[in-house]
Image (spheres, grey):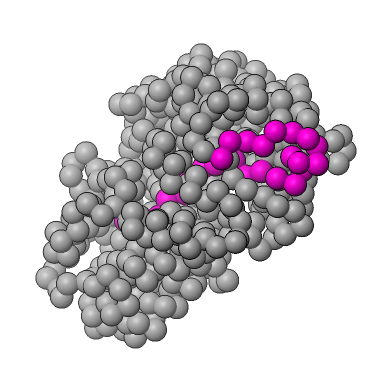
């Protein structure tokens, strides 16, 4: 029965991918940036975009009322260029992105999943920004290496631009810890007294049946990399060369099972169905129903606005054999079919430049790409939470990025469904992950 189900899924997925990818390759002419005035770092930039008087951008999240809206408004005021926002629901984003690029109707700037940059690059769907970087004298010296070097492909192309990074950390309800008499997590990047077992012990002490849970780990997909790597699987989900499904290796299986057992064995984590509604994990923490919550630092602005009934802070992820987190890169790209690539680069330069980065830093949304602005974020946090915001810099310095191949999007579609069987206590991690290894590795090889 299992073979029949997977075979059918393989066929349907392969059909959809082949159709979309073929159209994408056929309809994506190369666009080479031409000469233009140098792009400034601050609010005086905008000359390149001014000729078109508008630049379009698409993001998978609602922009209204977010730091992104503030940055885009600041850009409009500084440049006189109208920013046209094309929203797209997150659940339909990848499909819409592919369709728009294939049809030549893509906006000038698009948010792109950092996991999929290499795949889109291999399809010639993204503009190489190398000439922009060279023209503007951007060498990466002022940037965090992890953030700056991420978009650079093995071919040398620079096909995405990051406006920041969101390391995964542990948000925790300090008030709950203190009232329960549980020792607080570390305030520096250390796993002393902060191993998997210590995390579980704290979660058990914080859990109150039918009232609150001590922890939530598996709702953030970054878990799939962070906990296996910390448990001793160096490459996380995939091998360093992108050919093997190392999430099905023993150390990874052990880490995945540990996370599932927080629910299935120990009862300290919400059931999988409880956290599947969009926004539910954030709401649970803000409502004081979670003691610890593993997620990207980018949810901090939401917590500042909504988690106001108690004191909260951030802690490092627990260690085991190592103590490592994942650096989620906030990426945007310029589609190769963009009609205003000069304006697109001008907008991206502003978003990561001093004025844009300052707005993002003040909101606590994510770490700006330049070290100077990251220092500004920490030093100007004031009295707002989290108290130990400097931990996000430590997190970035102790982070990994996933090992990508051109086929990550395909591979993920196979194993994520099997993981749900583990999280809903219907299968062991060993059975689910070893059972799907062959299909995932064939997907990584581009065979299905």
Q: Is residue 160 magenta?
A: yes
Instruction: Pick out the residue farthest to the right.
Output: 210
Q: Position of residue 116 (x, y in %)?
A: 38, 44
Magenta highlight range: 159-187
Q: Nearer the viewer, residue 52 or 223?
A: 223
Q: Is residue 48 above or below residue 16?
A: below
428 horizontally vs 143: left or right: right
Q: Position of residue 317 (x, y in %)?
A: 55, 34
Q: Position of residue 41 (x, y in %)?
A: 27, 70
66 horizontally vs 304: left or right: left
Q: Nearer the viewer, residue 262 or 180?
A: 180
Q: Is residue 278 visible?
A: yes
Q: Position of residue 52 (x, y in %)?
A: 28, 81
51 horizontally vs 378: left or right: left
Quadrant of the snapshot with the C terminus: top left
Q: Is residue 112 visible?
A: no
Residue at the location (36% across, 33% down)?
403
Asked which quadrant contains residue 27, the reply is bottom left
Residue at the location (33% across, 43% down)?
146
């Amino acid at each position: 029965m299992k073979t029949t189900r997977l075979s059918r899924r393989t066929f349907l997925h392969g059909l959809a991918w082949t159709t979309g990818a073929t159209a994408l390759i056929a309809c994506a002419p190369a666009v080479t940036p031409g000469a233009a005035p140098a792009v400034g770092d601050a609010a005086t930039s905008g000359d390149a975009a001014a000729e078109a008087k508008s630049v379009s951008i698409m993001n998978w999240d609602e922009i209204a009322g977010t730091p992104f809206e503030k940055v885009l408004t600041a850009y409009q005021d500084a440049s006189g260029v109208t920013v046209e926002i094309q929203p797209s629901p997150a659940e339909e984003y990848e499909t819409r992105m592919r369709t728009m690029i294939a049809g030549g109707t893509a906006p000038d700037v698009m948010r792109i999943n950092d996991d999929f940059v290499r795949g889109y690059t291999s399809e010639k769907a993204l503009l190489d920004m190398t000439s922009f970087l060279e023209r503007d004298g951007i060498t990466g010296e002022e940037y965090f290496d992890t953030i700056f070097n991420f978009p650079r492909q093995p071919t040398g192309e620079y096909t995405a631009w990051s406006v920041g990074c969101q390391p995964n950390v542990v948000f925790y309800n300090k008030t709950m810890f203190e009232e329960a008499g549980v020792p607080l997590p570390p305030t520096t990047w250390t796993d002393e007294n902060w191993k998997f077992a210590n995390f579980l012990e704290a979660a058990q002490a914080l859990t109150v049946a039918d009232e609150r849970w001590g922890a939530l780990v598996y709702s953030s997909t970054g878990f799939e990399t962070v906990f296996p790597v910390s448990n001793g699987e160096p490459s996380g989900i995939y091998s360093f060369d992108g050919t093997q499904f190392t999430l099905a290796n023993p150390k990874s299986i052990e880490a995945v099972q540990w996370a599932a057992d927080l629910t299935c064995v120990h009862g300290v984590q919400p059931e999988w169905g409880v956290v599947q509604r969009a926004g539910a994990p954030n709401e649970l923490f803000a409502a004081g129903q979670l003691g610890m919550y593993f997620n990207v630092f980018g949810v901090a602005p939401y917590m500042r606005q909504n988690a106001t009934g108690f004191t909260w802070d951030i802690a490092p992820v627990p260690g085991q054999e190592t103590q490592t987190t994942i650096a989620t890169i906030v990426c945007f790209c310029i589609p190769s079919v963009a009609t205003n690539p000069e304006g697109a680069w001008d907008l991206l330069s502003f978003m990561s430049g001093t004025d844009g980065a300052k707005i993002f830093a003040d909101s606590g949304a994510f770490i700006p790409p330049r070290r100077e602005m990251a220092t500004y974020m920490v030093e100007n946090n004031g009295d707002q939470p989290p108290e130990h915001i400097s931990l996000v810099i430590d997190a970035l310095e102790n982070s990994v990025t996933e090992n990508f191949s051109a086929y990550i999007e395909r591979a993920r579609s196979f194993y994520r469904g099997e993981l749900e069987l583990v999280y809903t206590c219907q299968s062991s991690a060993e059975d689910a992950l070893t059972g799907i290894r062959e299909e995932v590795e064939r997907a990584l090889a581009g065979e299905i």
